[in-house]
Image (cartoon, helix red, strand yellow):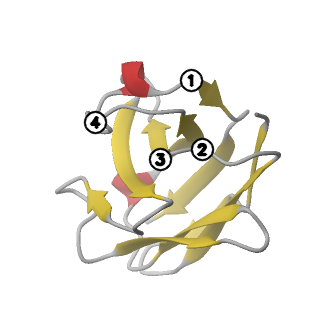
Amino acid sequence: VQLQASGGGLVQAGGSLRLSCAASGRTYATAWFRRAPGKEREFVAYIRWSVGSTAYADSVKGRFTISRDNVKNTVYLQMNSLKPEDTAVYYCAGARAGSDFYSRREYDYWGQGTEVTVSS
């Protein structure tokens, strides 16, 4: 399965962006991770395709929304009320199976990343 992430860009604090992750095939779960400059890659959100259940990191809860389009085989990350600390390269990832979807080790496929910069 190949994943193609897009939608990053430069936005002012308080603004919004929507990231997209287009997949060539279906996965059990799809997630977004991010890596800020000088930091390790961290979990942002995931969604399970079959039931649509979602989970978020505390740092983005209430501001970000993950969703899926079954027809387009695409996962979205709507990011609102962006803060400078959201600046990072965002990666989408797909898992064939598993349960600990907060962990990057659970994922089998990774997209190339899309850069988000939030200015203050």
SS for dot 2? loop
Rendered image quadrant of residue 73: bottom right
- How packed is label 3: few (under 14 Cα within 10 Å), some, or many (20 or more)? many
Label 4 belongs to which residue? Answer: 99
Label 2 belongs to which residue? Answer: 27
Label 1 belongs to which residue? Answer: 108
First in sequence, mark 1 or 2: give its number: 2
Q: Position of residue 63 (x, y in %)?
A: 32, 75
Q: Position of residue 47 (x, y in %)?
A: 42, 58
103 sits left or right of 95 in the view: left
Q: Compute the Cα span from label 4 to label 2.
A: 13 Å
Looking at the image, is mark 1 or mark 2 nearer the viewer?
2
Q: Is residue 14 above or below residue 92?
A: below
First in sequence, mark 1 or 4: give its number: 4
Looking at the image, is mark 1 or mark 3 nearer the viewer?
1
Amino acid type at circle 2 is Thr
- Identity of the residue drawn at 76% across and 74% down: 71
- How packed is label 4: few (under 14 Cα within 10 Å), some, or many (20 or more)? few
Q: Position of residue 43 (x, y in %)?
A: 34, 40
- Identity of the residue drawn at 43% across and 66% down: 120
Amino acid type at circle 1 is Asp
Looking at the image, is mark 3 or mark 4 nearer the viewer?
4
Q: Compute the Cα span from label 3 to label 4.
A: 12 Å
SS for dot 3? strand
Q: Are marks 1 and 2 in contact (CB under 8 Å)?
A: yes
42 sits left or right of 23 in the view: left
Label 3 belongs to which residue? Answer: 31
Q: Compute the Cα span from label 1 to label 2.
A: 9 Å
